[in-house]
Image (cartoon, rainbow, N blue to C red):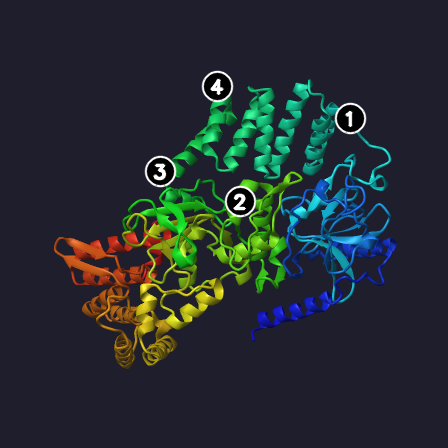
């Protein structure tokens, strides 16, 4: 058992020990004064040690459903049906989800930031307990989410036992926590402030206080004031209503709650249809939601009123560029690539997905299919990431999560991406609906995902974590071409837990095939998918999830373990038909070749004996393949390229050419070289960087033989393959300086 598996099992044993306390009342419960003192000491310790860089560990135990009930529908089973089913802290029992109830508490402390936000709270009876909030918005100050004096409702609370001792109220689902206004009728009188600082019955004063809160970046506080003002505003006070809607829209925009911002801007426009600020905020919200046509319409209406408005003119030009990209797939990939830096990876571009459609794909569930016929090298899609993390948030770089539901250990970017997905689904329900439609593996869906209660969508944290496990892409820090340059030059790579991770909605539907027909590359947070061969209309698009060169038995084991399916592509079927004896022989030969020659892909010179042995081993590998099959012979590619490199160093152009072209053929490509030019049939080819390597070897061999026209044509093919691999031509010379 490896280290991670052992750690998971240790955490599982601890959680099982904690579950033994299920249904029991906590014992040795500290009084409020002790809890406050302990919390204060932890805050001071965190401040003194600057613990941002310290390792923080959390455990995700049994999955449980979020609350699918509106706060005011949580009624007692008996007694007054009009009363809210409130539960007191003293009535909570361990390891239990108190369904049908709500806990209403006031926050007593500043937040302690670990893998969660921890505060001490008290209920109307003066009883205190710790409250831990998980998956909170990293863009928002914890003081805003859960600061001292706030009154919050925890729907269907869960009291978690710590196997080492102690307990706390744990909230995994962000939609299970609601911030309450002090004047809300469901807030117990014992938690309400004795004197309100502001006359909340005066909408004008609510507007002023909301603006002050906005100025000090207390965005939730501003929203609370604006909302309170709207709830008491006289129906004839249209001007104040318009301002409150408009200002609340601004607060929602800052919090990236674009759907709420758009609704408020539109509500303001119903009152004042020509208001410039409302039109601009409606346009901004539509832009962020990818609703570019609507954004353009709002901006044009704005400019009709104020033709010289500089913000409107700038944003109209920007949205017109997005519409062109979205509708035609016209991108300047070189310019896009040049814009990317290690600190500027989130690009401002639209997604182009019009050549694809999601359809049923038999035993694979759903897949992505072409809506038009495509040629090799054509752009299939270019999509902006739904969410992406790049290891640049120190808050998550030192977090480790043991997820007992998915049996995974997540760290760094994986933890950050999980939180970002949860928050994005929470902030904008329509975007969340697209997310939860993705494959979730064995985790069942209820059909009620993203339903809105109490003004917020219900977000199932555990469902999104399963979706992440099945749909995440590990991508490059800047560009795919840079990643390959670093790998080939043996530059130091980032720690695995800092490897960038992202999720693309449309691209996530692409299924696996070892005999794939597309290849993906990354430029910033854009994924570029291009055809590696001609693809007829209504054909499923496929990618390789694992390296096809891997032994077929190992490939199938990896795919089954990671994605829970068996690959039966043409390559797997052909290879699996061979006897275990033949497959084992090929695997042994590959290991022998790798051990002796892998570090000599471009050797300064091998001895005659080394070259002879490399030739002999290559022939033995060739003998393990069925000569009557047209399928690629991938185990031959690396040794053939090593031979081409060896003969290059000896300036033996004929031998270099022989082995280079053999490598191209082993990848399934058919190359026809004639006096009229070079043509490459890719219908059975597997495009990899090795194909480009082989073509460049062949090009330089022809150049050495004096056949410069053929050499140039082969290099053109190599460059075209490079663009298919990386979406851009940038970096070709740097990668192939050796040729």
In percent of width and height, residue 17 lies at 72, 69
In percent of width and height, residue 57 lies at 66, 62
Residue underneath mark 1: 201
Lower position in the chain sequence, tag 2 or tag 1? 1
Lower position in the chain sequence, tag 4 or tag 3? 4
Query: 520 or 614, which is in the foreground?
Result: 520
Lower position in the chain sequence, tag 3 or tag 2? 3
- Measure the C-alpha gap from mark 1 to mark 4: 38 Å
Classify mark 2: residues with Cα within 10 Å, few (<14), some (14-19) or many (20+): some
Q: What number of labels is visible?
A: 4
Residue underneath mark 4: 304
- Measure the C-alpha gap from mark 2 to mark 4: 35 Å
Report the mark closest to the observer, 2 or 4.
Answer: 2
- Measure the C-alpha gap from mark 3 to mark 2: 26 Å
Report the mark closest to the observer, 1 or 4.
Answer: 1
SS of the residue under disc 4: helix
Report the mark closest to the observer, 1 or 3.
Answer: 1
In percent of width and height, residue 101 lies at 74, 48
- Measure the C-alpha gap from mark 4 to mark 3: 27 Å
Residue 12 in the figure: left or right of residue 119: left
Residue underneath mark 2: 433
Farthest left residue? 675
Classify mark 3: residues with Cα within 10 Å, few (<14), some (14-19) or many (20+): few
SS of the residue under disc 3: helix
SS of the residue under disc 2: helix
SS of the residue under disc 1: loop
- Measure the C-alpha gap from mark 1 to mark 3: 53 Å
Quadrant of the rendering where the N terminus is positioned: bottom right
Lower position in the chain sequence, tag 2 or tag 4? 4
* Mark number displayed over residue 328: 3
Task: Give the image quarter of residue 260.
Answer: top right
Lower position in the chain sequence, tag 1 or tag 4? 1
């Amino acid at each position: 058992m490896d280290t991670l598996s052992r750690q998971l099992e240790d955490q599982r044993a601890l959680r099982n020990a904690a579950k033994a306390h299920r249904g029991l009342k906590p014992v040795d419960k500290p009084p409020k004064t002790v809890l406050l003192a302990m919390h204060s000491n932890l805050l001071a310790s965190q401040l003194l040690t600057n613990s941002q860089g310290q390792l923080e560990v959390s455990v995700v135990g049994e999955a449980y459903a979020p609350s699918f009930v509106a706060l005011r529908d949580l009624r007692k089973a008996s007694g007054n049906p009009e009363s809210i089913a409130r539960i007191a802290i003293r009535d909570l029992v361990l390891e239990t989800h108190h369904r049908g109830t709500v806990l209403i508490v006031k926050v007593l402390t500043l937040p302690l930031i670990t893998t969660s936000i921890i505060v001490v709270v008290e209920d109307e009876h003066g009883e205190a307990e710790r409250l831990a909030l998980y998956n909170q918005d990293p863009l928002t100050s914890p003081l805003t989410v859960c600061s001292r004096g706030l009154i919050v409702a925890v729907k269907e609370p869960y009291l978690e036992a710590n196997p080492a001792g102690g307990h706390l109220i744990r909230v995994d689902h962000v939609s299970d926590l609601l911030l309450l206004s002090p004047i809300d009728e469901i807030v117990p009188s014992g938690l309400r402030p004795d004197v309100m600082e502001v006359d909340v019955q005066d909408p004008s004063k609510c507007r002023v206080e909301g603006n002050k809160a906005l100025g000090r970046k207390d965005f939730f506080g501003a929203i609370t004031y604006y909302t309170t003002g709207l709830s008491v505003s006289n129906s004839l006070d249209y001007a104040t209503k318009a301002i409150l809607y408009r200002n609340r829209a601004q607060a929602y925009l800052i919090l990236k709650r674009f759907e709420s911002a758009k609704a408020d801007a539109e509500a303001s426009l119903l009152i004042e249809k020509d208001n410039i600020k409302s039109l601009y905020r409606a346009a901004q919200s539509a832009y962020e939601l990818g609703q570019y046509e609507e954004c353009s319409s709002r901006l044009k209406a704005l400019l009709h009123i104020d033709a010289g408005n500089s913000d409107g003119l700038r944003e109209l030009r920007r949205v017109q560029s997005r519409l062109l990209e979205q509708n035609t797939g016209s991108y300047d990939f070189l310019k896009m690539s040049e814009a990317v830096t290690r600190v500027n990876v989130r690009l401002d571009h639209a997604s182009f997905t019009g050549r694809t459609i999601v359809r049923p794909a038999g035993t694979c569930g759903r897949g992505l299919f072409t809506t038009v016929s495509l040629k090799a090298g054509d752009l299939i899609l270019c999509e902006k990431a739904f969410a992406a993390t790049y290891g640049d948030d120190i808050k998550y770089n030192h977090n480790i999560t043991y997820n007992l539901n998915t049996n995974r250990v997540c760290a760094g970017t994986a933890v950050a991406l999980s939180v970002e997905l949860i928050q994005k689904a929470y902030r904008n329900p329509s975007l969340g609906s697209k997310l939860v439609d993705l494959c979730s593996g064995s985790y069942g869906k209820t059909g009620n995902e993203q339903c809105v209660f109490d003004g917020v969508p219900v977000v199932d944290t555990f469902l999104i974590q399963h979706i992440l496990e099945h749909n995440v892409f590990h991508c490059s820090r800047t560009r795919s071409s840079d990643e390959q340059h670093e790998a080939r030059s043996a530059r130091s790579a980032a720690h695995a837990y800092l490897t960038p991770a992202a999720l693309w909605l449309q691209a996530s539907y692409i299924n696996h095939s070892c005999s794939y027909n597309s290849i993906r590359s990354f430029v910033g947070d854009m994924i570029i998918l291009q055809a590696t061969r001609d693809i007829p209309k209504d054909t499923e698009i496929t990618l390789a999830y694992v390296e096809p060169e891997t032994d077929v038995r190992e490939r199938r084991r990896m795919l089954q373990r990671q994605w829970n399916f068996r690959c039966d592509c043409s390559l797997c079927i052909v290879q699996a038909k061979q006897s275990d004896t033949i497959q084992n022989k090929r695997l042994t030969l590959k290991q022998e070749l790798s051990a002796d020659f892998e570090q000599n892909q471009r050797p300064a010179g091998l001895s005659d004996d080394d070259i002879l042995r490399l030739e002999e081993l290559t022939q033995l590998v060739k003998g393990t393949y069925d000569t009557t099959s047209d399928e690629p012979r991938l185990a031959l590619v690396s040794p053939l390229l090593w031979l081409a490199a060896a003969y290059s160093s000896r300036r033996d152009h004929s031998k270099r050419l022989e082995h280079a072209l053999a490598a191209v053929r082993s990848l399934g490509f058919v190359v026809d070289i004639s006096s009229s030019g070079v043509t490459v049939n890719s219908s059975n080819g597997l495009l990899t960087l090795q194909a480009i390597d082989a073509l460049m070897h062949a090009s330089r061999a022809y150049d050495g033989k004096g056949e410069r026209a053929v050499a140039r044509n082969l290099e053109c093919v190599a460059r075209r393959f490079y663009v298919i691999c990386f979406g851009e031509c940038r970096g070709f010379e740097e990668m192939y300086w050796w040729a």
